[in-house]
């Protein structure tokens, strides 16, 4: 470890191009675009790292992730960092000595999205595709998560070290008939596709079912969501699996970014507002349809009480020609948020957003009042189906009834 600089590559799964060099010196991080990449005019981070400026510099003391947002998006959050730190400890490396460049070097090509990093850790076992058991992975994940085992297992170090978010999860390949599972950070065998499985809690076996229901509600509300399914393990606990939108087909790769990465935001602080996200949607996509999609998600998160809407939970996809669109919505579930607040506020209101705040968000995105009313009606109708879906999927009343009561309060808000 102890890397001071690293190459950044853009890998589509069919070809690989050098983007530039990321380097650290003292309390400063520097990124320099390669001339060839800059001439292509493809903007991976148009707001903060435009190619018109070849060399960019950051004071590390001013950045939460100690690197540029573009590359911080490649780094894992709580769960992946936990696995990575346990693995480093096993190698005799102190956590305090690990830099963001070290972490990117560890991930190498085993990242989400199209950005890869050299030099990767030279460990041939990390590239091996092998059959996996969802139940075994879930148990090992939660033992590690709760501190009952100290070492990250080899399998989890391979397939759990890249995903973001706090809840234990893994990157896997699922066969076309959903009967077989393999480790899935790299290329997959024919007949398998890339999925992310998020494990239901050891103390709450219905976490995955609840998130699955929320995805169904969001889809009925007109929100774009990825393909999703429930996978039962050998103990009949159901875990939610989501089709990866950064792997569109076969072993192709697409560049993805979050609002956190694009804006150099702090995802651990409630610094973002939906009005700002409306402007981001317009600036990235120049599409009224995408602006309406962003507003629809704001409405869904408000009425469905999904307050875990921090800046890393708003995603975007860049196509190979440099055009952008919103990614499918993800991490959708019932969440009361920090102290009952949304991480992303509604025209300045995070604690108790109301219709007037939602209307202000719509105006910031130039959404017509007619469209706003139609979107709100569709979202509310979808959210109202929660209790029926909870009954359909066997969610216990002790879990579903309190949620339904809180949703009813939101749905009754005066226009």
Image: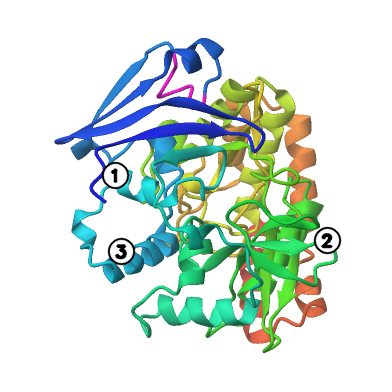
Judged from the image, the secondary structure of the residue bearing numbered disc 3 is: helix
Lateral position of residue 323 relative to residue 380, left or right: left
> Which image quadrant for residue 117?
top left
Mark 1 touches mark 2? (CB < 8 Å): no
- The image shows residue 384, relative to residue 13, as above or below, that is below
Mark 2 or mark 3, which has the lower sequence index?
Answer: 3
Element under disc 1? loop
**Is 135 drawn above or below residue 287 in the view shown?**
below
Say whether disc 1 or disc 2 marks the residue closer to the N-terminus. 1
Residue drawn at point x = 78 percent, y = 52 percent: 219
What residue is pinned by disc 1? 64
Determine the CA span between mark 2 and mark 3. 35 Å
Q: Residues within 10 Å of mark 1 (few under 14, many from 20)?
A: some
- Decide whether the magenta segment is chiefly helix, strand or loop: loop
* Magenta highlight range: 44-51
> Around disc 3, counting alpha carbons within 10 Å, would you say few (fewer than 14), some (14 to 19), or many (20 or more)?
many
Q: Please tell me whether residue 12 belongs to the stretch shown in magenta.
A: no
- Answer whether residue 49 is magenta in the image: yes
Left or right: where does residue 332 sit relative to residue 53?
A: right
Q: Residues under labels 1 and 3: Cα distance?
A: 21 Å
Q: Residue at x 62, y 58 (%)?
A: 332
Q: Is residue 83 above or below residue 298?
A: below
Specify the label residue 176 is tagged with: 2
Q: Which x, y percent locates residue 106?
A: 39, 52
Residue 88, disc: 3
Of tags 1 and 2, the one toward the viewer is: 2
Give x and y (percent) for residue 96. Answer: 19, 58
How far across and how far down the image is residue 98, in percent? 25, 53
Q: For the residue labelled by badge 2, is the local secondary structure a helix, a strand or a loop? A: loop
Which class describes the residues within 10 Å of circle 2: few (<14), some (14-19), or many (20+)?
few
């Amino acid at each position: 470890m102890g890397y001071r600089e690293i190459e950044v590559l853009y890998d589509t799964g069919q070809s690989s191009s050098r983007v530039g060099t990321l380097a650290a010196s003292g309390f400063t991080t520097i990124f320099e675009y390669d001339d060839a990449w800059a001439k292509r005019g493809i903007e991976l981070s148009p707001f903060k790292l435009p190619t018109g400026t070849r060399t960019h510099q950051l004071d590390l003391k001013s950045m939460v992730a100690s690197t540029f947002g573009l590359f911080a998006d490649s780094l894992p959050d709580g769960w992946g960092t936990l696995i990575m730190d346990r693995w480093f400890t096993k190698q005799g490396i102190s956590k305090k000595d690990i830099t963001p460049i070290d972490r990117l070097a560890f991930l190498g090509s085993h990242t989400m999205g199209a950005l890869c990093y050299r030099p990767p850790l030279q460990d041939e076992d990390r590239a091996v595709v092998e059959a996996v058991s969802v139940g075994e992975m879930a148990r090992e994940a939660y033992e590690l998560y709760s501190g009952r085992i100290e070492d990250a297992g080899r399998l989890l170090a391979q397939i759990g070290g890249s995903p973001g978010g706090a809840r234990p999860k893994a990157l896997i390949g699922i066969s076309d008939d959903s009967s077989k599972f393999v480790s899935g950070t790299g290329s997959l065998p024919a007949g398998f596709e890339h999925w992310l499985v998020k494990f239901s809690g050891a103390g709450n076996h219905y976490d995955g079912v609840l998130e699955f229901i929320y995805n169904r509600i969001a889809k009925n509300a007109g929100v774009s969501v990825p393909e999703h399914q429930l996978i039962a393990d050998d103990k009949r606990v159901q875990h939610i699996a989501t089709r990866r939108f950064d792997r569109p087909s076969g072993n192709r790769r697409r560049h993805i970014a979050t609002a956190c990465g694009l804006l150099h935001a702090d995802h651990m602080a409630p610094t973002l507002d939906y009005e700002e996200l409306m402007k981001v949607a317009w600036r990235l996509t120049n599409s009224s349809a995408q602006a309406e999609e962003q507003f629809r998600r704001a409405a869904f998160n408000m009425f469905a009480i999904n307050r875990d809407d921090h800046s890393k939970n708003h995603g975007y996809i860049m196509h190979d020609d440099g055009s952008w669109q919103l990614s499918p919505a993800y991490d959708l579930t019932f969440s009361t948020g920090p102290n009952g607040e949304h991480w992303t506020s509604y025209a300045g209101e995070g604690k108790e957003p109301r219709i007037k705040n939602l209307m202000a968000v719509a105006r910031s995105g130039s959404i017509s009042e007619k469209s706003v009313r139609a979107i709100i009606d569709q979202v509310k109708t979808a959210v109202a189906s929660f209790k029926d879906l909870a009954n359909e999927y066997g969610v216990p009343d002790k879990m579903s009834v309190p949620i339904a009561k809180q949703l009813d309060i939101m749905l009754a808000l005066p226009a």
